Amino acid sequence: MSDRPLYRFAPSPTGYLHLGNARTLLLNALLARRRGGRLLLRLDDTDAARVKPEYVAAIREDLAWLGLAPDLEARQSERADSYGAAFERLKAAGRLYPAYETAEELDRARRLARASHLPPVYDRRALKLTAEQRAALEAEGRRPHWRFRLSGGRAAWEDGCRGRQEIDLDSLSDPVIARDDGGFLYVFTSVVDDAEFGVTEVVRGEDHVANTAVQLDLFAALGAEPPAFAHHNLLTTAEGAGLSKRAGSLSLRSFRAEGIEPLAVAAYAVLIGSAEAVRPVAGLDELAQLVDLAKLSRAPARVDFEELAALSAKTVHGLAFADVAPRLAALGVGGGAVFWETVRGNLRTLAEATDWWRIATGPLPESAERPRAEDSDLIAEAARRLPAEPWDDATWKAWTTDVGAATGRKGRALYAPMRLALTGWPHGPELARLLPFIGRERALERLSASS
């Protein structure tokens, strides 16, 4: 077994990953990157009714989109033998017992406990059944589910996010680890996997804190060394609701469709709700250096899509041509590094480079704005004084200086009408750099149409 740290990301392929899932994924992946460790992608795919092949494929696509490649991959659906062997070991050790209550009976018992101001903890009534009573229940057609008998006392650990944690095991119900159909549940299978793969650190949401207390008892019962645990704060919608794969809340697929940069998603998912300011980063290596579990807030962090979109735009503005060249080529955008550096500061998404490439090299769309009628004389004079090619970055200044001298126009009164005539937009990239891409023939055609 490797002596390198092993982290894991364990999604259920029952929906599309959302930003909260990305937070857990990235915290694990970036800590592994910084500490020379490895990342295990474990697909918790035992819920046959809800797991779909497209969700499995989408998880892999989302990881690749974020620039992450797991070192190992496992599927729980292929590990039934390991779970069965661990189950039999616990059973032989007297730590498991069959229980026969239906879901309705358990729910009624919880409601009665609450009504009596008692904690809704399972009362271990199944342990009081005689062999004859169990046989009678099975003769009725009931099949048992199996519970793990907690050892009692206090489960304690040093949490990487929350500091010292202690939970009284007597305050928890003995967990069901196997359903009446023989299927095993997460709280158990996760322990078996972490032990067998040698996971050294588990970073997950704070909604798993109680699970950790139970799982530490399971590790001890199996004679296995537990990993270190850290429970990060959760993300919520702007309204304070939890994120859900079923609801499709803030899914990574939706961000991709909106043109949000994956590096911006990574930075936002990691830095929101922490002592580090949310800001653009140059790459995952830089982001990995900013990860500090101790700096995460204890309060949930609300996601603001507009804040994410603004971060994405800033990320685009900082992307070097080498980082985006293949993507620009796939969009049909030419012009090399010069064109990219000309337009990137005016883009909200990389895909908008396509619009400026069309404006620079094709006909203006019918929706393009035109100069006002009172500016027609200015545009006509600009057409008459249009310099001969070749053009470079100095052409725009020389040309506008000449037109300004001839018309008495200056500042916005000079530049704004000429920009509208040439691009159809009242704002955009610096025309000194864009003009050579438009070219004299196209510029003259546009000026003539506006004069």
Image (cartoon, rainbow, N blue to C red):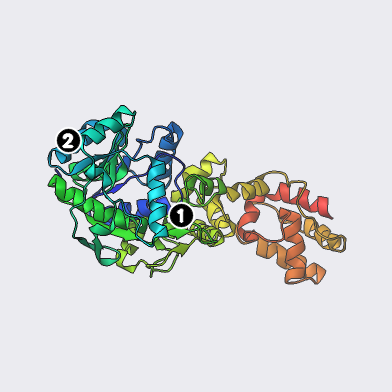
Which residue is at 56% across, 44% downward?
334
User: Is residue 152 visible to the viewer in this orientation of the structure?
Assistant: yes
The amino acid type found where label 2 is placed reads Glu
Where's residue 280, x and y in %? 45, 62
| Residue 58 numbered tag | none
Question: Would residue 64 appear left or right of 238 to someone viewing this image?
Answer: left
The numbered mark, 1 or 2, whose residue comes first in the sequence reads: 2
| Quarter of the rendering occupied by the C terminus | bottom right
| Quarter of the rendering occupied by the N terminus | top left
Q: Nearer the viewer, residue 236 or 180?
A: 180
Which residue is at 25% across, 31% downward?
135
In the structure shown, which secondary structural element does the residue marked by tag 2 occupy? helix
Question: Would residue 178 appear left or right of 396 to someone viewing this image?
Answer: left
Q: Between tags 1 and 2, which lies in front?
A: 2
The amino acid type found where label 1 is placed reads Val
What is the C-alpha distance between the residues marked 1 and 2? 44 Å
Question: Would residue 435 appear left or right of 302 to someone viewing this image?
Answer: right
User: Is residue 200 visible to the viewer in this orientation of the structure?
Assistant: no
For residue 177, what is the image quadrant? top left
Q: Residues within 10 Å of mark 2 (few under 14, many from 20)?
A: few
Question: Would residue 280 appear left or right of 154 to someone viewing this image?
Answer: right
Q: Nearer the viewer, residue 173 or 435?
A: 173
Q: Which residue position holds label 2?
A: 88
Q: Nearer the viewer, residue 192 or 416?
A: 192
Q: Residues within 10 Å of mark 1 (few under 14, many from 20)?
A: many
**Total number of numbered discs in the rendering:** 2
Where's residue 139, x and y in %? 30, 27
Q: Which residue position holds label 1?
A: 265
Which residue is at 55% across, 61% downward?
239
Query: Eyeballing the image, is 192 above or below 386?
Result: above
Q: Nearer the viewer, residue 83 or 65?
A: 83
Which residue is at 71% across, 57% downward?
425
